[in-house]
Image (tube, rainbow, N blue to C red):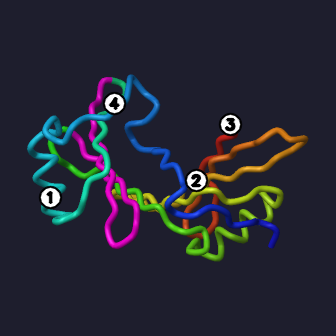
């Protein structure tokens, strides 16, 4: 397989692809500005974790809150709506932990690319993997974001 696994977990930049992305705006906020319902539900689900960042995002008029933290050595982002309902959980995972079917898909279709980052994304009705790949052609970087299910089926592909 010609896909190379690069980077350490600590050096990866966490780019969020959630139901509240690239919309009307995003801003880092202090924890005391997070709605009480969001804080309460987060603290019940994840007691005794150190929060690294709170973000408020708005897309198409819908406000949601992302909370980024580390639990048992894994970087996790949870996304809540204003009422405190969990919308999504994103867990940064090592590329080596991808299902074999995904690795096969990537090594075939993206043989010249390297895996830069992998997120396991869990929603109420769906679980999938978001994989960032990069390649250099004539010293020009190419970035591709691929969304796949655990069987290796590609659901979305975005070239940047």
Within the magenta stretch, is there residue 142? no
- Is 49 displayed left or right of 138 in the figure? left
Q: Main secondary structure of the magenta part?
A: strand
Residue at which label 4 appears: 27
Residue at which label 2 appears: 147
From what the image shows, is residue 37 above or below residue 3?
A: above
Q: Earlier in the sequence, mark 4 or mark 3?
A: 4
Distance between mark 3 and mark 1 Cα atoms: 36 Å
Residue depicted at x 17% and y 65%: 48
The label number, if any, that marks residue 160 in the structure image: 3
From what the image shows, is residue 53 above or below residue 154?
A: above
Instruction: Confirm or deny contact between disc 3 and disc 1 (CB under 8 A).
Output: no
**The N terminus - image quarter:** bottom right
Part of the protein shown in magenta: 61-81
Corner quadrant of residue 121: bottom left
From what the image shows, is residue 70 above or below residue 72?
A: above
């Amino acid at each position: 397989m010609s896909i190379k696994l690069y980077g350490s977990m600590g050096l990866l930049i966490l780019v969020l692809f959630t139901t509240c992305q690239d919309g009307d705006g995003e801003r880092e906020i202090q924890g005391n500005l997070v709605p009480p319902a969001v804080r309460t539900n987060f603290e019940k689900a994840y007691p005794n974790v150190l929060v690294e960042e709170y973000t408020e995002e708005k897309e198409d008029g819908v406000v949601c809150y992302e909370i980024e933290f580390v639990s048992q050595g894994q970087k996790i982002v949870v996304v809540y709506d204003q009422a405190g309902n969990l919308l999504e959980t994103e867990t940064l995972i090592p590329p080596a932990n991808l299902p074999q079917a995904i690795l096969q898909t990537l090594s075939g279709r993206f043989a010249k690319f390297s895996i830069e980052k992998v997120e396991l994304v869990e929603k109420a009705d769906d679980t999938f993997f978001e994989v960032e790949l990069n390649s250099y052609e004539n010293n020009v970087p190419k970035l591709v974001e691929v969304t796949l299910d655990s069987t290796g089926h590609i659901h979305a592909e975005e070239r940047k």
